[in-house]
Image: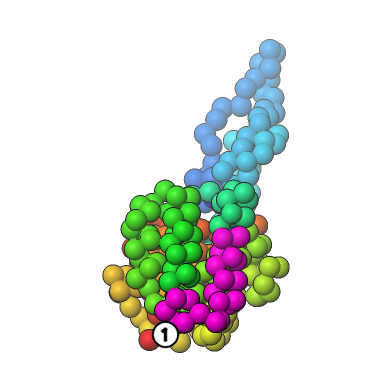
Amino acid sequence: YPMSTWVSGDPQILQLDDINCYLVDIWRVIAPVNSTAPRSSQGHPVTPKTMTSTHLYPYTRSVVRRSERTPGFGSACRAFVAVALVAVIVMFGMPQQVSAKPMPQSQERVIAQSAQEAVAVFDSFTELSAVDRNDVFSALVADIARQAALFLGLDVRLMQQAWLAADLVHQRALINGLTQLGVPYKINAAIENVAFDCSGLVAFAWGKAGVALSRGSSAQFASATLVKVEEAQPGDLIWRPGHISMYLGVPSAVLQTPYSGRSVELQKMNERITSWVKYANPLV
C-alpha cells in the first residue's frame, strides 16, 4: 500500500478483521525467502546480493539474502518490524481504499469555477423573488451536476435528478464545497481557498449555507440525523470511523479531502467501504 494512504482525515477506530488482513500482507513482505547461496568458481560460498523491491518500498536497493543471516537474529528482526508496523496502523489509521485517481487540475478548475459562479449568482440576485432566484440557481446546479457526473463516469441524468430533487440548503452546501476543489488537505485546517481537512471542508460547506457544524468527523455525524442511503440527499454527510465526506446523490460518489498529499476532490468509494458507511442529514 502506498505509505501516503496511512494518514487519514481523522484518527480511525481499527477493525480486527482489517488488522488481520494487513498483518498477513506485512508478513508476506518480511517473511524469509528460501534460497541457496551461490558458490564461486573455486567452490567457496560467496555473499550473494540482489536488487529487490516491494510494494511497501518500491525503490530497488542492494541487500544481503536472508539465508545468509543468523536465524535467531532474523526472527527477532521480523518480529520487531511486525510490531512497529502494527504500531503505525494504531497511531495513524488504516489505509484508505480509493477507486479513482485524483482529479486532473484542469477539470478541478472548471467545476470549481462553475460552482463559484453559481454561488455569486445566488448571492447577487437578491432583487428577484425567491422562486425566480431558485430557478436560476437550479439551472446552474444542473450544469454542475452534469460536469461532475461526466468526470466520475456516472449517469448524467441520474445525478441531475438527485441534485435538483434536494432542498435548497442541501444544494447550496454541496455547491459551496465544490468551490474548494483542488484546495490542498491539511490536518486541523478549515481555511477557504487555503487548506482543509475532512471535517473542515464539511463545516465550511454547511456553514456557508447557514448551518453551523462543529469540527471533528465524529462530532459532526453525532449532531446530524442518521438516514438510509435511499433517503440521503446530495450534500448529506457520509461517515465512517476517522473520515467524513459529502454525498453526491449517487451511490459511492462523494466530495471529500482524504489525507496529506491530496486535495478537495470528487471521488468514488470502493464497494467494501460503500457497504458499511453511514449517512446523516444535518437539517433533520
Where residue 120 appears, as percent x and y from the top left, is: 60, 71
Compared with residue 22, is residue 57 higher up or lower down, i.e. above or below?
Answer: above
Compared with residue 17, is residue 102 higher up or lower down, i.e. above or below?
Answer: above
Q: Is residue 98 left or right of residue 45?
A: left
Dominant SS of magenta comes to helix
Q: Residue at x 63, y 34 (%)?
A: 52
Q: Residue at x 48, y 70 (%)?
A: 137
Residues rendered magenta in the picture:
112-133
| Residue with the mark numbered 1 | 283
Q: Is residue 62 left or right of residue 171?
A: right
Pick the residue in front: 118 or 261.
118
Pick the residue in front: 268 or 32.
268
Q: Residue at x 59, y 35 (%)?
A: 67
Q: Is residue 121 magenta?
A: yes
Which residue type carries mark 1?
Answer: Leu
Compared with residue 156, is residue 142 higher up or lower down, i.e. above or below?
Answer: below
Quarter assignment of residue 196:
bottom right
Whether residue 129 is visible, yes or no, is: yes
Looking at the rendering, in which quadrant would you find the C terminus? bottom left
Pick the residue in front: 178 or 72.
178
